[in-house]
Image: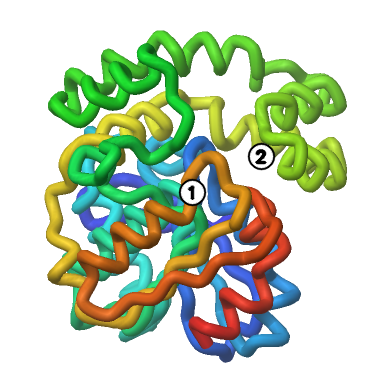
């Protein structure tokens, strides 16, 4: 479990796999999730000639919590790249992690050479309709409307009760790996639940503990991703490939159409018949090949 001490004294937890001499690609995990989501891509990365590095954002696992921000995690990834002796790199963002990948490319255009996202939401406040998901009821639309108009601090308090309730149902402190793994998979769509449940219970329980053991990571992510972003998509100079599952209910492909219309160089690729997490798990070879 590599740990890096950043210049400001915070700890950054990260891991890597694939081809150690390959093209560097930094993975930005979803929410709530961790660097562990990249581990399933190690074999595909080795075949594609990719050195796949992933770091936990502040508040996940052993990464020191920090106030909600897009720019701080972007700077953290560049500092990690410096520590690893990596000058330029590609970025792969899963789900909400895709927005952090885009923020990093916008903030550090001289370091990021290519971006791929999988199931990435658009900037919902500016979309039409202004929601990342389809089929929301009145309460769901009101929730996203409030986040779009809120500040990071007010959004943390808005999402805190719901997340703490979710966390209590997951119960990451439970030492029973089998029970924890079942609860971790249960809220997922059926197609994603099958994929998660197929892994060893001990690994899934460890992932749940790392992702939800400290609430700060999720709260910081949720506070910024559905508000107005503090970076401009027009500043992303490198090519971007936006991957979506055809049946993704968390981030339907229309998110990609909106992002592609606002990015200088981007294309949308739809994976037939796939859902949200399923698009990453089954799409590793294609996504990494595009980055390599």
| Image quarter in which the N terminus is found | bottom right
Structural crowding at the residue carrying mark 1, measured as other residues with C-alpha within 10 Å and reported as few (<14), some (14–19) or many (≥20): many
Q: Is residue 198 left or right of residue 167?
A: right
Q: Position of residue 263 (x, y in %)?
A: 23, 70
Closer to the eye: label 1 or 2: 1
| Alpha carbon separation for disc pair 1 and 2 | 25 Å
Question: Which residue is painted at 48% across and 26% down in the image?
Answer: 214
Q: Is residue 107 left or right of residue 255?
A: left
Question: Which residue is painted at 53% across and 60% down in the image?
Answer: 244
Res 143 seen here: yes
Res 3 seen here: no
Answer with the quarter of the image where residue 117 lies: bottom left
In the rendered view, tell whether residue 48 sits above or below residue 123: below
Upstream in sequence: badge 1 or badge 2? 2
Question: Which residue is painted at 36% across and 66% down in the image?
Answer: 80
Q: Position of residue 291 (x, y in %)?
A: 49, 82
Q: Position of residue 274 (x, y in %)?
A: 68, 56
Q: Position of residue 270 (x, y in %)?
A: 55, 66
Q: Which residue is mark 2?
A: 207
Q: Which residue is mark 1?
A: 252
In the rendered view, tell whether residue 182 sits above or below residue 168: below
Q: Across the whole image, how many numbered discs are drawn on residues?
A: 2
Q: Is residue 184 left or right of residue 252?
A: right
Answer with the quarter of the image where residue 21 lies: bottom right
Question: Which residue is painted at 23% across and 48% down in the image?
Answer: 70
Q: Is residue 18 left or right of residue 204?
A: left
In the rendered view, tell whether residue 284 sits above or below residue 32: below
């Amino acid at each position: 479990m590599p740990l890096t001490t950043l210049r400001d004294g915070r700890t950054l937890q990260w891991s890597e796999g694939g081809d150690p001499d390959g093209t560097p690609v930094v993975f930005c995990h979803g929410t709530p999730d961790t660097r562990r989501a990249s581990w399933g891509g190690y074999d595909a990365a080795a075949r594609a000639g990719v050195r796949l590095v992933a770091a936990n954002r502040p508040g996940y696992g052993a990464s020191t919590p920090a106030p909600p921000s897009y720019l701080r995690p972007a700077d953290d990834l560049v500092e990690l790249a410096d520590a690893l002796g990596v000058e330029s790199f590609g970025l792969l963002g899963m789900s909400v992690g895709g927005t952090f990948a885009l923020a990093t490319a916008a903030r550090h255009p001289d370091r990021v050479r290519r971006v791929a996202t999988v199931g990435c939401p658009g900037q919902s406040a500016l979309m039409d309709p202004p929601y990342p998901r389809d089929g929301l009821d009145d309460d769901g639309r009101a929730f996203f409307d409030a986040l779009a108009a809120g500040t990071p601090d007010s959004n943390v308090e808005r999402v805190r009760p719901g997340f703490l309730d979710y966390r209590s149902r997951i119960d990451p402190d439970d030492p029973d790996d089998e029970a924890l793994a079942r609860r971790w998979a249960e809220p997922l769509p059926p197609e994603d639940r099958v994929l998660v449940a197929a892994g060893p219970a001990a690994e899934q329980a460890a992932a749940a503990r790392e992702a939800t053991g400290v609430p700060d990571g999720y709260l910081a992510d949720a506070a910024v991703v559905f508000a107005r972003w503090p970076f401009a998509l027009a500043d992303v100079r490198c090519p971007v490939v936006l991957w979506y599952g055809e049946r993704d209910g968390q981030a339907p492909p229309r998110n990609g159409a909106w992002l592609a219309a606002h990015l200088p160089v981007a294309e949308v690729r739809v994976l037939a018949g796939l859902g949200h997490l399923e698009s990453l798990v089954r799409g590793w070879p294609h996504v990494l090949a595009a980055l390599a």
